[in-house]
C-alpha cells in the first residue's frame, strides 16, 4: 500500500508537506501541490481513513442516509452533493438501511457528519435516536426534528404554481401528490394548494386532490387516470414531484389528450431533467445547484462547529416552459 511517506520520498518533500497538499491546504504553493497530487495519482495512493482519523480526529467521511434508490430527485441531489464534497476532500458513505441502523453503522465508521434525506419514515424515526456526538443535517425535515436542516419553502412553491395557472385562465385545477399514509412534507404542499385556491376566489372540488399509495411513477399514472375519468376533467394539474409527473404525462397521452393543449401541467422539482421531457415541463422549486451547494456548505460548517444548530429555508422559483398554456 502506498503511503504518504512513499509520496514524500518520491517528490523530495517532507511528510507534512504531502499531508497538507493532499488536504488542499493553502499553506502549500500551487506548483508544489500539483506536483505532489500528480505523483500520488501515478502511484495509486488511496487515503487511509482510519489513520487520518487518528491524526486529525476526523475521518474525512460523511454518512448519507438515502431513503430510496428509485427517486429521480434524490438521485440528482446525492450525485451533485458527492461531487461538491469530493472537491473539499471528503468521501461520502451511502446507506439505504433504516435510519437507526444507518446511523449506528456510521457511528462505527466515525464519520464526521451525517446527512439525512427527510421523508415520512425518517421523521418518525428521529424520536427513537439516542443522543449523538456526530452532527446531523437533514434535508426536507425542517421543524420536524431537533437537528439542523436545509429545506425548501414547499408551500410557497405550490402557491407559485397555482398563481401561474390562474393567470393563464385556469379555474379548475387538480393536485396529484397526496399519499394514503400521513406524510408531513406532502401535507404542507396540499394545504398550500387548497389555501391559495381559496385565496384567489376559486372553488376547490372534493376530488381536486388525488390520493395515491406512494410518490412513484405508477402512483402518478394511476392517479391521473382517475382524474381523467372524472365527469368534469380539470384543465390543469399540479404534480407533487418529477416521478409523479412522468406517470401523469403517460396517462394523459394514453387518454388521447395533449399537454398543454388539453391539460396544462406544472410540476414540483426544479431539476434539469424536466426540460428534457417530451414536453418541456413548467416547474416550481429551488434549482438543484442551489440546494446542493447550500447542503454541502452547511454540513461543512457543522463539522467545524458541531454544537451549532442551523436551519436554512430556500425560496422557490417558477420556471415557465411548454407544459402550460393560456386557457
Image (cartoon, grey):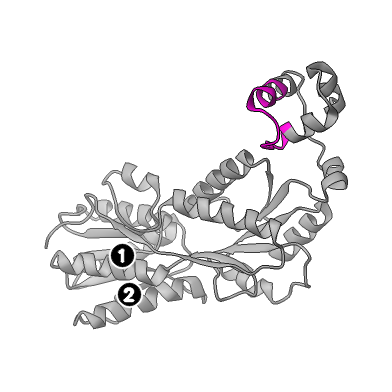
Regarding residue 327, the answer to whether it shows in the image is yes
- Return the residue nearer the eye: 44 or 218: 44
How many marks the image carries: the answer is 2
- Which stretch did the figure color magenta? 21-36
Instruction: Please state the horizontal and vertical placement of residue 111, each as a whole percent of the image.
Output: 76, 53
Q: Which mark is on residue 93?
A: none
Report which quarter residue 308 is drawn in. Answer: bottom right
Residue 250 left/right relative to 58: left
Quarter placement of the N terminus: top right
- Residue labelled with disc 1: 238
- Residue labelled with disc 2: 193
- Helix, strand or loop for disc 1: strand
Instruction: Please state the horizontal and vertical placement of residue 124, each as a whole percent of the image.
Output: 63, 74
Residue at 63 percent across and 40 percent down: it is 86
Answer above or below: position of 186 versus 200.
above
Callout 2 crowding tier (Cα within 10 Å): few <14, some 14–19, many ≥20: many
Callout 1 crowding tier (Cα within 10 Å): few <14, some 14–19, many ≥20: many
Amino acid at each position: 500500500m502506498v503511503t504518504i511517506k512513499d509520496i514524500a520520498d518520491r517528490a523530495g518533500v517532507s511528510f507534512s508537506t504531502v499531508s497538507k497538499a493532499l488536504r488542499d491546504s493553502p499553506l502549500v504553493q500551487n506548483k508544489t501541490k500539483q506536483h505532489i497530487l500528480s505523483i500520488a495519482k501515478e502511484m495509486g495512493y488511496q487515503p487511509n481513513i482510519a489513520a487520518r482519523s487518528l491524526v486529525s480526529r476526523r475521518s474525512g467521511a460523511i454518512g448519507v442516509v438515502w431513503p430510496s434508490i428509485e427517486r429521480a430527485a434524490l438521485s440528482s441531489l446525492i450525485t451533485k452533493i458527492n461531487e461538491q464534497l469530493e472537491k473539499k476532500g471528503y468521501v461520502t458513505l451511502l446507506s439505504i438501511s433504516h435510519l437507526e441502523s444507518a446511523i449506528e453503522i456510521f457511528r462505527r465508521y466515525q464519520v464526521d457528519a451525517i446527512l439525512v434525506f427527510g421523508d415520512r419514515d425518517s421523521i418518525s424515526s428521529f424520536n427513537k435516536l439516542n443522543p449523538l456526538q456526530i452532527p446531523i443535517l437533514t434535508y426536507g425535515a425542517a421543524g420536524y426534528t431537533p437537528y439542523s436542516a436545509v429545506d425548501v419553502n414547499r408551500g410557497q412553491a405550490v402557491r407559485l404554481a397555482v398563481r401561474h395557472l390562474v393567470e393563464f385562465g385556469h379555474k379548475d385545477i387538480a393536485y396529484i401528490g397526496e399519499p394514503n399514509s400521513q406524510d408531513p412534507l406532502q401535507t404542507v404542499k396540499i394545504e398550500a394548494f387548497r389555501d391559495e385556491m381559496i385565496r384567489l376566489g376559486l372553488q376547490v372540488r372534493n376530488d381536486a386532490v388525488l390520493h395515491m399509495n406512494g410518490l412513484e411513477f405508477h402512483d402518478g399514472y394511476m392517479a391521473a387516470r382517475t382524474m381523467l375519468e372524472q365527469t368534469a376533467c380539470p384543465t390543469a394539474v399540479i404534480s407533487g414531484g418529477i416521478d409523479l409527473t412522468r406517470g401523469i404525462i403517460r396517462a394523459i397521452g394514453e387518454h388521447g389528450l395533449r399537454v398543454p393543449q388539453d391539460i396544462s401541467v406544472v410540476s414540483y422539482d426544479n431539476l434539469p431533467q424536466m426540460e428534457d421531457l417530451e414536453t418541456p415541463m413548467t416547474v416550481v422549486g429551488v434549482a438543484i445547484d442551489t440546494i446542493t451547494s447550500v447542503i454541502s456548505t452547511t454540513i461543512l460548517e457543522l463539522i467545524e462547529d458541531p454544537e451549532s444548530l442551523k436551519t436554512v429555508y430556500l425560496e422557490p422559483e417558477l420556471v415557465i416552459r411548454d407544459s402550460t398554456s393560456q386557457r
